[in-house]
Image (cartoon, helix red, strand yellow):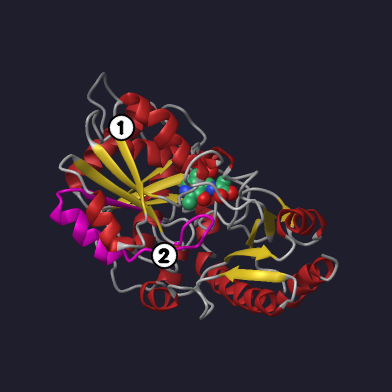
Amino acid sequence: MTQNPNYHLETLAVHAGVEPDPTTGAVMTPIYQTSTYAQADVAQHKGYDYSRTDNPTRTALHGALAALEGGTYALAFASGMAAIDTILRLIKPGQHVLSGNDVYGGTFRLFDKVLSGLGIEFTFADTTDDTAVSAAIQPNTKLIWLETPTNPMLRLTDIAAIAQIAHVAGAWLGVDNTFASPALQSPLALGADFVVHSTTKYIGGHSDVVGGAIVLNDTAVYEQLKFLQNAIGAVPGPMDCFLTLRGIKTLAIRMAQHCRNATQVAHFLADHPAVAEVIYPGLESHPQYELAQRQMRGPGGMISFILHGGEKAARLVARETKLFTLAESLGGVESLIELPAPMTHASVADSPLAIDPGLVRVSVGIENAQDLINDLKQVLNRV
Ligand code: P1T
């Protein structure tokens, strides 16, 4: 069923990649908790041989991820960072990567502190501005890298427009689709060459597993990435693949509830006198509201906001909510709250990408919206 292009996302999320187990008929793909596989003869084996190279639970996950993103191939990794790092292994010393200037702190750290030292050139530019992207292209630009919406400023980039700029320049476009999830945005259909996810977030959806994914269409590049996946070895274990597959089944209904709840929470925040600014792609006040309507199938579950009381008030709010847990990460069923500057984005602190220390980021979960609003209200009324 994985190959049927007529199924909708809700159906793909439940079925794609998962076939009844050939030996037992088990409806859910088993956790093939094995490192190795018996072979019939020496060096003539077809099929599975070693679980770094492949594992049936991972194969099922690959099928599900490819189908969700409308791609031909998917590869799963031990983390989102491992997925991003593996794509960057396609870039050679002396080549140039043009990255968005508002990306996850860990992505910036990988580019700036690890890969720059290996001779890859990086420029950080505002990908929300086509002119700035065109101006930053160099003759050796091989990859444009962006997040949309970005973490944590929730800025949007017009994927189709940047894909065109990338392809005219002979470069690839990689899009980190973690914040939107495949339920809300399809970068490959808009011209991206790679889609990446931290499956730790909405795809896994339950804050119980760390993982990453790459989805793409090009067969030759897939073969290179598959080689790199095995050669580097940052693969997820079978249990992690199982948990991610299990999470995927409810992706569509979870995302619908994340969007509904976040919309209500964003409106509440926008109306509260303690709040100076709310950033949410579903609010008409978002500077790229029109692009959000055009490019995304929903505004998502992430909201960032700034309080009139600045950093002190932000720290109080982050500490004193009850339902919103003070924690890094996002995209799980439970609501989380954090301050990006000292937490998830500490690694950009002394760079041009530094985040306002008073910015609060919330990942709105699937609880009851009024309960979430009441929780924020009890603390906002005190700042
Ligand atoms: O944590 P990991 O699975 O390795 O994924 C890294 C990553 C990649 N891309 C985006 C957009 C991300 O947000 C992340 C991880 N982000 C957090 C842990 C966070 O709290 O923002």
Q: Is residue 299 left or right of residue 258?
A: left
Q: Label 1: which residue?
A: 228
What amino acid is found at the position of numbered circle 2 in the picture?
A: Leu
Residue, x 24% and y 62% (percent of image)? 191
Q: Is residue 40 left or right of residue 283?
A: left
The quadrant where residue 115 appears: top left
Q: Which residues are magenta?
A: 149-176
What amino acid is found at the position of numbered circle 1 in the picture?
A: Leu
Q: Residues within 10 Å of mark 2 (few under 14, many from 20)?
A: many
Q: Foreground residue, 173 or 382?
A: 382
Q: Is residue 187 left or right of residue 114?
A: left
Q: Are marks 2 and 1 in contact (CB under 8 Å)?
A: no
Residue, x 42% and y 56% (percent of image)? 18
Q: Residues within 10 Å of mark 1 (few under 14, many from 20)?
A: some
Number of numbered discs on residues: 2
Q: Foreground residue, 6 or 342?
A: 342
For the C terminus, the image quarter is: bottom right
Q: Label 2: which residue?
A: 156
Residue, x 73% and y 57% (percent of image)? 314
Circle 2 SS class: loop
Q: Position of residue 30 (x, y in %)?
A: 51, 46
Is 150 colored magenta in this rendering? yes
Circle 1 SS class: helix
172 over 35 or under it: above or below: below
State the separation of the CA atoms marked 2 and 1: 30 Å
